[in-house]
Amino acid sequence: MIRFEHVTKRYADGTTAVDDLSFEVAKGELITLVGPSGCGKTTTMKMVNRLIEPTSGTIHLDGDDISAIDPVELRRRIGYVIQQVGLFPHKTVLDNTATVPHLLGWTRKKARARAAELLDLVGLAPSTYGDRYPDQLSGGQRQRVGVARALAADPPVLLMDEPFGAVDPVVREHLQNEFLRLQSTLHKTVLFVTHDIEEAVRLGDRIAVYGAGRIEQFDTPATVLGAP
Ligand code: ADP
Ligand code: ADP
């Protein structure tokens, strides 16, 4: 589903963020990328949705070289959730969630109907929360809107970059459980970045353990935990 082949990213200042990375993720797999700050996790993710171009190497999505997929098509195929959710402050929760499908050409009515479904799915009843503005939500609720928004156009792939990093531990555990429940029915192909090994173990079908610019281990949670 996602295949990295000898992917290297060197930034303009000479920093090698990712060094000759090769790995494959199967359809429906949830991979957690874990490791200390600065080891290349975010760079890896951003190359998948082409926010960053690799210096060398190729990335395939379902057999297609991503450098040949146009940006709108890529948006349809990949949802993206980040820690600073980046909701539009002057749009309601419902309109925030409907934004991506609307941009992709869905009618306003269809996009809003879909947004309402998604808000329900992430535990935010649209009748209660749909007309609120982002600053009328708690941190955990804002993250839920971020997840709903990323799912709204029903992309097969989700990139999640520390999506639950900004909330307190109790809320984070709720969000993790809800996300696992969602994933058990949606079966998205997920790359999930975290610096928290517990979160990586809890969520991942497999874990990519990063050291500087490289994946040092790529295996199931049981094997990663059992490793010396
Ligand atoms: P992580 O997500 O694991 O914290 P990043 O992928 O953000 O790591 O960063 C990997 C390395 O690349 C770090 O050394 C970081 O400082 C560097 N880096 C990230 N973005 C840039 C940039 N735009 N220009 C130069 N160096 C960058
Ligand atoms: P959490 O523990 O999830 O972070 P909060 O303590 O921040 O929750 O919020 C508790 C409740 O108060 C939530 O239902 C949230 O929607 C509501 N709330 C939080 N901030 C505001 C606000 N500025 N205006 C209206 N309701 C709010």
Image (spheres, helix red, strand yellow):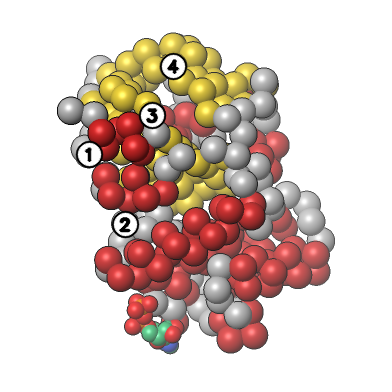
| Residue toward you, 92 or 205 | 205
Q: Amino acid at mark 2?
A: Gly
Ligand 2 picture quarter: bottom left
The answer to which of marks 1 and 4 sits earlier in the sequence is 4
Q: Position of residue 103 (x, y in %)?
A: 70, 53
Q: Secondary structure at mark 1?
A: loop
- Label 3 vs label 2: CA separation? 23 Å
Q: Amino acid at mark 1?
A: Ser
Q: Position of residue 38 (x, y in %)?
A: 23, 34
Find out if the beta carbon at label 1 lies less than 8 Å from the nearest ligand 1 atom: yes
Say if residue 55 shows up in the picture: no
Circles 2 and 1: CB atoms closer than 8 Å: no
According to the picture, the residue beneath numbered tag 2 turns out to be: 165
The answer to which of marks 4 and 3 sits earlier in the sequence is 4
Front position among marks 1 and 4: 4
According to the picture, the residue beneath numbered tag 4 turns out to be: 22
According to the picture, the residue beneath numbered tag 3 turns out to be: 219
Q: Residue at x 37, y 13 (%)?
A: 20
Find out if the beta carbon at label 4 lies less than 8 Å from the nearest ligand 1 atom: no
Quadrant in which the C terminus appears: top left
- Label 3 vs label 1: CA separation? 21 Å
The numbered disc on residue 37 is: 1
The answer to which of marks 3 and 2 sits earlier in the sequence is 2
- Label 2 vs label 1: CA separation? 13 Å
Q: Secondary structure at mark 4?
A: strand
Circles 2 and 4: CB atoms closer than 8 Å: no
Quadrant in which the N terminus appears: top right
Disc 2 residue crowd, few under 14, some 14–19, many 20+, Cα 10 Å: some
